[in-house]
Amino acid sequence: MACTIVLSLALGLAPRCGDEHSRAQEPSAADTPAAAPDGATALPLRGPAEPLRNALETITGDELLEHASFLAADALDGRAAGSAGGQKAGDYLIEQLRALGLSPAGTDGEFVQACGPNMRNILAKLPGSDPQVAEEVVLVGAHYDHIGQRPPREPDQTPTIFNGANDNASGVAGVLELAEAMVALPVAPRRTILFALWDGEERGFVGSRFFVKQPTVPLDRIVFVIALDMIGRLNDERFVVWGTGTANGLRQLVARQNVLPNLDLDFRTYNLALSDQQPFFQRGIPVLLPSTGIYPELHRPEDDIELLNVDGMRRATQLVHAIVYDLAQRDTNFQFAEIAREESSRDPRRATDPPAPSPEDAACPLGFTFRRDPREPGVWLIVQVTPDSPAALAGLQAADRLCQWNGADVETIGSAASASNETAEPVRWLIERNGKFHVLDARP
């Protein structure tokens, strides 16, 4: 039986997938479904409640482009750490954060933390609204430096400027817009949010490493770190999220916040040690690194503003905003997964998706094998689908995450064999694929 399109949540299928700790989303007007791979149709889940939706709508392409254009202008000479252009960039960021009414979070009551010769981290915070958890901190940041300029090869030539529009004027613009959206909320999130704009990343995470050694907020109060790095070159709707293996349950957290942005998410469990979340990861703090990935103009003078996908930046920033808001609102914090240290020492390109079969995989009479996903409590990872089986005809694919079975969380139904033999009526599954939820119907 082919996949059946479901047009509402009247059946009680909600994308909980094992997580009962989030306060981030509540019912609102349903979002329009988008086409999904192989003829399936994305489940039109209800998006964020009106106050959060209104805040998300303050994230605009025009403002993202305005911020990125200033930072990636020739006048800043490529924003090398410690340069005059880098100082101009830092001054601009201070001006923007102050205008939003955020509190300084640097040293001596200022927005600045000196972190090296003429280098400055720019730090601001939005204090939490819940006295019980307001001392806990969710940190979201981006590096604002780039690699500067290359001297002329001939006396009559001018220097070659590396403007770094995507790397990382795009990420900094995202943090500024995210901060504005947080300020627009009628009530601040429960936990404090620290906005960190790092200097010296291109020289080996100078600013973030300095902060970890001399934090302006106690390091043990930082419960999560997100680094935005190169979010401006969305291609084929693919948006990469590294680090989903640094705590159990992160994949489903990110997927639940993808209703409005509706991006095709490329989840990587590994922590990619190439940006400013790395010093925090080394201290055992869960991290995420959202990015549009590597691109041909990286660290080349052609990385200019004209190549940015501005609407992609907007949707990426909305996704990260929703993630940060969830992290700041939830009842319990994510706990660092120690196994992530071992995994992140490997080459992330060796990750296999779909998963390799194992003799320990369980079998379902409807034509698939699965295992319980150790990283995603309450989710079954589909390993193999038998051709022409009810599961295959319904549209189930290897690497799908099965969240619900006839409206019940999969962890509560006992076994797939017993559940599939209970009735001859069609079985309805809620699955997550590439960060989007789908409903599939299979006939036993």
Image (tube, grey):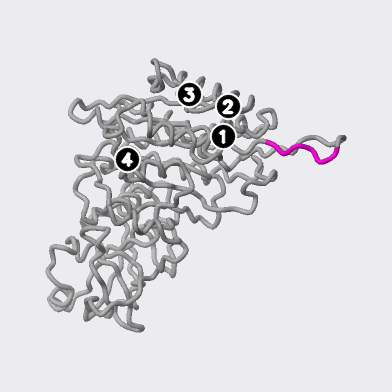
Looking at the rendered structure, the kind of residue marked 4 is Phe
Q: Which residues are magenta?
A: 149-154
Looking at the rendered structure, the kind of residue marked 1 is Asp
Residue 145 got which mark?
1
Which comes sooner in the sequence, label 3 or label 1?
3
Distance from the alpha carbon under mark 4 to that under mark 3: 23 Å
- Residue receiving disc 2: 89
**Percent of width and height locating residue 23:** 23, 40
Q: Residues within 10 Å of mark 3 (few under 14, many from 20)?
A: some
Distance from the alpha carbon under mark 4 to that under mark 2: 26 Å
Q: Residues at badges 1 and 2 in contact (C-beta under 8 Å)?
A: yes
Q: Residues within 10 Å of mark 1 (few under 14, many from 20)?
A: many
Which comes sooner in the sequence, label 4 or label 3?
3
Residue 393 lies left or right of residue 206; in this view the side is: left
Work out whether 86 lies above or below 251: above
Distance from the alpha carbon under mark 3 to that under mark 1: 14 Å
Looking at the rendered structure, the kind of residue marked 2 is Ala
Under tag 2, what secondary structure?
A: helix
Q: Residues within 10 Å of mark 2 (few under 14, many from 20)?
A: many
- Residue receiving disc 4: 224
Q: Residues within 10 Å of mark 4 (few under 14, many from 20)?
A: many
User: Nearer the viewer's eye, disc 1 or disc 2?
Assistant: 1
- Residue receiving disc 3: 114
**Percent of width and height locating residue 325:** 32, 37
Residue drawn at 43 percent across, 17 percent down? 110
